[in-house]
Amino acid sequence: MGQETKLLSLLFLSLALGDVCFGKLLPEHSAPASTSSLESNDVDSAIKVSEPSSWTNNFNDTVDLILQVLQETLKKSNHTTIPIPDIEEQFIKKMRFIKIKGKLTARKGWFKDLSTVYRTGDAKIVRSGPNITISVSVGLGLLQLGYDYVHVKVEALSATGNLTAKVSTNSVFIQVNVVMSDTGKCNLTLQELEVTQLDELQVHVEGFKKTFDWLLSEIITIVSRRFKEKILKEVEKDVIVAAQEAMDNFHC
């Protein structure tokens, strides 16, 4: 039995002890009077799951442990960084009384770091018969993107460099449906994944001469707009596929 299975099974064991609903803790008489500490042999010996002070903490601790395993899995499979779409866009820069046409090309784009995923809010669980719905907000400790090749051409002038950008605060709402069978097996399905909080991009451009500083604002505007309109959607698609594949590998 793998780490993911043991950690997820711990969650279901907790659920089996009583009913849980959004935003509420179990009544005191529903909680077990005393339980011994639980420890998985497959998890690092330093990580132990003991009886929490509240049911909310219990589920939070379990989700945190699952996320720790997910972090290590992403690192080992080299899925911490994913490619992002190229940018090729024409623009018009106003310079006093004249308008200058230009073109921005950005290639070799990347987005990271999926392995820095962590919980940003309380895990909430609803149990209805054989169905269990788990909802939690997560974020990335490091949300950074970049383009290793950035080329700007304005009339007869051109410059080549690279850029990086990061978002300090971010949060994604995730909802997972778990269906339990009579035999004790379960099936996990990702029901919802939605970005609920996202700070503005902090963009840094390198390699351009100071004579092109007047173009930096245009580059930042284009990249920021593309990030919200297209890049973020592509990242979401990749994350949804990766998350569902990971859940398909859970057996409990």
Image (cartoon, rainbow, N blue to C red):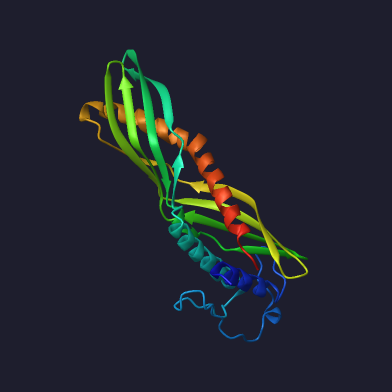
- Relative to 228, say whether 184 is above or below: below
- At a point 63% along the width and 71% down the height, the residue shown is 9
Q: Is residue 94 left or right of residue 48?
A: left
Q: In this view of the protein, which residue sits in the foreground, 46 or 1?
A: 1
- Relative to 29, say whether 55 is above or below: above
The percent position of residue 60, horizontal first and vertical second, equals: 56, 68
Q: Is residue 124 left or right of residue 102?
A: right
Please identify the quadrant where the N terminus is shown.
bottom right
The percent position of residue 141, horizontal first and vertical second, equals: 42, 56
Please identify the quadrant where the C terminus is shown.
bottom right
The percent position of residue 217, horizontal first and vertical second, equals: 34, 30
Q: Number of numbered discs present?
A: 0
Residue 150 position by quadrant: top left
Q: In this view of the protein, which residue sits in the foreground, 185 or 124?
A: 185
- Relative to 167, say whether 23 is above or below: below
Q: In this view of the protein, which residue sits in the foreground, 146 or 168?
A: 146
Q: In this view of the protein, which residue sits in the foreground, 12 or 121?
A: 12
The percent position of residue 229, horizontal first and vertical second, equals: 51, 34
Residue 189 position by quadrant: bottom right
Q: Is residue 193 left or right of residue 45?
A: right
- At a point 71% along the width and 74% down the height, the residue shown is 16
**Residue found at the very far top of the displayed protein:** 97
- Relative to 172, say whether 39 is above or below: below
